[in-house]
């Protein structure tokens, strides 16, 4: 069975600082995708960043980057220069098979403080 | 381009009733997936439809069913509602559902409350 685990239910960070959200996963598949999604309060879930498992290079999207450790099955998200608008639930997710079925972690509630 | 729309946005039902939720994907998207989000169980995959066929199904009882129409719009139905079915139901659409990457876009959700 595929699993995704987020061990930090809540985190906070000061505006302009850097924060790292942790995620571990388990799968026997070789080809898969990993994602971080952001769900702001009362707003729609949006994709933050994705990582293809066959790519060794860590994905980066502006202030967001990942540290993908395939052997350790770890996929953490680093947010640099945190902004108030980054306050949200963050979900780590994996897509392990054909189709669009996502397996989500339990989420990390991030609060950015002014 | 309009995003994923879900109707209704809020719904209150009583135990034993049935409910139908609707999802209209982004124009041109043929894959629609449904998820249930609850505080206790988190986000759980219900099922995915692609070209009117159910392609993947999560671990939910048979009371949960869905379908997809030729215009890619999808509905999900829950029969004999239970208190535990209270949740935010999210729909996500993507262009195609193949092994290659296709970003999924989520709708705002339908919040179902079962009394």
Image (cartoon, coloured by chain):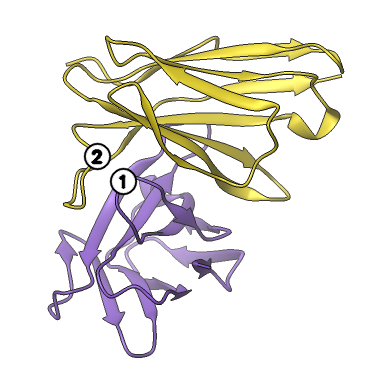
Question: Relative to the observer, which residue lies in front, B74 or A59?
Answer: B74
Is B85 on the left-hand or right-hand side of B54?
right
> Which residue is denoted by mark 1 in the rendering?
A99
Residue A60 falls in which quadrant of the image?
Answer: bottom left
- The local secondary structure at tag 2 comes to loop
Say if mark 2 contacts mark 1, CB within 8 Å: yes
Residue A95 lies, with reference to residue A8, above or below; the image says above
Chain B, colour shown = yellow
Q: Residue B97 carries which label?
A: 2
In x, y percent, where is residue A15? 38, 60
* CA separation in Å, label 2 and label 1: 5 Å
Residue B75 lies, with reference to residue B95, above or below; the image says above
- The local secondary structure at tag 1 comes to loop
Chain A, colour shown = purple
- Which residue lies at the image location 74% right of the left edge and 30% below the top edge? B85
Chain letter behind tag 2: B
Q: Residue A27 carries which label?
A: none
Is A2 on the left-hand or right-hand side of B63?
left
In x, y percent, where is residue B89? 57, 29
Is A63 on the left-hand or right-hand side of B21?
left
- Which residue lies at the image location 25% right of the left edge and 20% below the top edge? B26
Q: Badge 1, how many Cα within 10 Å: few under 14, some, many 20+? A: many
Total number of numbered discs in the rendering: 2
Q: Do labels 2 and 1 share a chain?
A: no
Residue A27 lies, with reference to residue A111, above or below; the image says below
Residue B89 lies, with reference to residue B68, above or below; the image says below
Residue A80 falls in which quadrant of the image?
Answer: bottom left
Q: Badge 2, how many Cα within 10 Å: few under 14, some, many 20+? A: many
In x, y percent, where is residue A34? 32, 63
Residue B34 visible in image? yes
Chain letter behind tag 1: A
In x, y percent, where is residue A17? 35, 70
């Amino acid at each position: 069975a595929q699993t995704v685990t987020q061990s930090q239910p809540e985190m906070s960070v000061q505006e302009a600082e850097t924060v790292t959200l942790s995620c571990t996963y388990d799968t026997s598949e070789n080809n898969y995708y990993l994602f971080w999604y952001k769900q702001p309060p009362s707003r729609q879930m949006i994709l933050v960043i994705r990582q293809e498992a066959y790519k060794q290079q860590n994905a980066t999207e502006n202030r967001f980057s990942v540290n993908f450790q395939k052997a350790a099955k770890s996929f953490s998200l680093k947010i640099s220069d945190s902004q108030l608008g980054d306050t949200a639930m963050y979900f780590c997710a994996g897509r392990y098979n054909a189709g669009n079925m996502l397996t989500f972690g339990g989420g990390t509630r991030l609060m950015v403080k002014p | 381009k309009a995003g994923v729309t879900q109707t209704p946005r809020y719904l209150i039902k009583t135990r034993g009733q049935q409910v139908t939720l609707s999802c209209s994907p982004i124009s041109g998207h043929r894959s629609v997936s449904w998820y249930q989000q609850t505080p206790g169980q988190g986000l759980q995959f219900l099922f995915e439809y692609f070209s009117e066929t159910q392609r993947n199904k999560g671990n939910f009882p048979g009371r949960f069913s869905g379908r997809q129409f030729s215009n890619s719009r999808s509905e999900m139905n829950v029969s004999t509602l239970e208190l535990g079915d209270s949740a935010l139901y999210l729909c996500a659409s993507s262009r195609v559902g193949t092994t290659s990457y296709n970003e999924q876009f989520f709708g705002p959700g339908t919040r179902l409350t079962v009394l």
